[in-house]
Amino acid sequence: MEPFFTTITEKKLNEKVETILKVSGVTKENTFISLVTHLLKISQYLVKNKGIFLIGENGTGKSYIYTEYLKDIFPKYSGSMITPALLIGDGRATPNDTECIFGEKAVLIEEICDDDESSQSSIGIFKDSLESGYFKKCKKENKEINISPVFTGNDYNQPNNLFDLISCKESIPKRYRDKGFLDRVPLLLPHNKKLFGEMNYYKSIVIEEFSLNDVLKNLRESLKEKNYITTDMEIGSEREEKIYNSFLNAITTLLYPNEKAPDWFIRGWFELLKFFRSLLIDEKVYNPFNEKSARLIIEILGYDTNDIDYLVFTTNRLLIKPKEENNIYKIALTGFGIDENQKEYDFYQNNMNNFISPIIEITKTILIQKAGDITPDKRIYLDPLNKIINEKNKTDEEFNYSILQSMEYCIDRNINFDNEKFSFRGIPDFYKYGLSTILFNAIGTNVPMDKIKFEDFILNDEDFKILNFVDYLQDS
């Protein structure tokens, strides 16, 4: 373990992540959502008696990490072949002379979406054993179970956005969707080409000084239960708290095996876990890209927080405003974000005009755009002092309305007034009339007022320019 500890200890988070990626075949040149999904799949070996679903299209690498890199610790079975005898041992056999799935530390069960109803009894045994922590081997002898199960299955639906992923669970057979079973296998990690974007893998195996299989085995042996949940995380039940603690403990043990993880690391991963949990148990998708996960995302992507002025999230992209340059970096967090960047770039190349903030460069996951300042309302500051200062600049509609009334009073009575004393806070709502005209001139269509968002514009030399416009293109 010494080579592993030496490589990963006291390193920046992006360096820790890259170390794990290198020994598991995936490059860092992938979308954020695909990277964190990959990390959760690896750390699953450190989650005892709770499993994950990997559901999605063929060719998205659902089983890749387990069949290519972790096959020694994740024995593989087909879902249609799982029987009670395979799980607990044949009742006619002697416990000491029989091997069974529940005697393993981990298992990969594939193609569950294609199996038949014959596995119903096996699901019940799985659920009860994971809950109790025990099983009756060969129906004779009580044995402790400490297994990390992974279930994979195909989903042939094509999501067009992040929120379409809520339908992913419909591909899981109903017998697996029993509420009790979803508390034992509580996360759904979707695998879709549109969600991940094109995946980049190392063309040859990277030789490191340590074995990932051996590292995971050793980390599991020394694994200790810890509580990461605080009262402000708003978890509804003790059962849910145990679920989140299990997965937080696993990912923390993998990346901070002998160090204390920062608070932003725990809170950021909690947001991501809520997203994967929502895909199984909620009616709508929880968007994990928010202020609570911002620092984690920045750190994993390898940006220096000291160089960042502020951040803004859209649904699939992170907008970064550096301190020392007058550009906005649009980081695609998902494959949907990659498509959004490309659509904006293509439109601008064919329709250059002065109403759109100039687009100057595009890479796989980044679009760079010349910019002024995004309106204060959606800005996220990592520095607490700047965050406090920004609060004073946010839109206050009640205050702005009183300013308008005062201005009207002065105008009606021909009273001169000082413009500086009648300054609005933030961007008054009536500015949308002007923004509607800008959008029409830029993309040639009338956008309804209720669909215009101030955060899609920047203020540059006292003029508004369009920053984000892919949603308006779709509307048009």
Image (cartoon, rainbow, N blue to C red):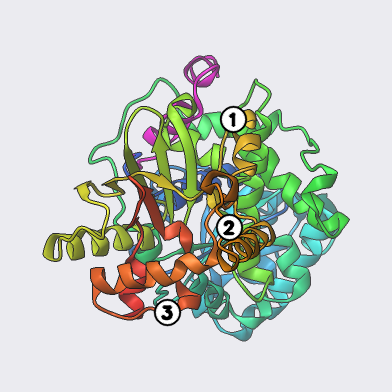
Mark 1 closeness class: few <14, some 14–19, many ≥20 residues within 10 Å: few
Percent x, y for residue 17?
46, 33
What residue is disc 1 on? 383
Residue at figure coordinates x 57%, y 31% from the top left: 255
Separation of residues labelled 1 and 2 (CA atoms)? 43 Å
Q: Residue 157 got which mark?
A: 3
Residue 227 in percent (x, y) is at 81, 38
In the figure, 80 relative to 75: above or below?
below
Residue depth check, mark 1 versus mark 3: number of the one nearer the observer: 1
Q: Work out whether residue 62 can be spotted.
A: no
Q: Earlier in the sequence, mark 1 or mark 3?
A: 3
Amino acid at pointer 1: Asp
Secondary structure beneath dot 1 equals loop
Q: Quadrant of residue 20?
A: top left
Residue 427 sits above or below residue 308 on the image: below
The mark lying in front, picked from 2 and 3, is: 2
Q: Is residue 134 visible?
A: yes
- Residues in magenta, as a range: 1-27
- Compare marks 2 and 3 and give the one earlier in the sequence: 3
Q: Hey, which quadrant is residue 218 in on the image?
A: top right
Number of numbered discs overlaid on the protein picture: 3
Check whether the beta carbons of the residues at disc 1 and disc 3 lie within 8 A of each other: no
Q: Which residue is mark 2?
A: 415
Mark 3 neighbour class, 10 Å CA radius: few under 14, some 14 to 19, many 20 or more: some
- Say what secondary structure mark 3 lies in: loop
Q: In the rendered structure, does residue 297 fall within the stretch colored magenta?
A: no
Question: Distance from label 1 to label 3 (Cα)?
Answer: 42 Å
Q: Position of residue 170 (x, y in %)?
A: 56, 80
- Image coordinates of residue 213 in percent, x first then y, are 50, 35
Whichever of callouts 1 and 2 sits on the residue coming sooner in the sequence is 1
Amino acid type at circle 2 is Ile
Q: Helix or strand or loop: what does disc 2 sit on?
A: loop
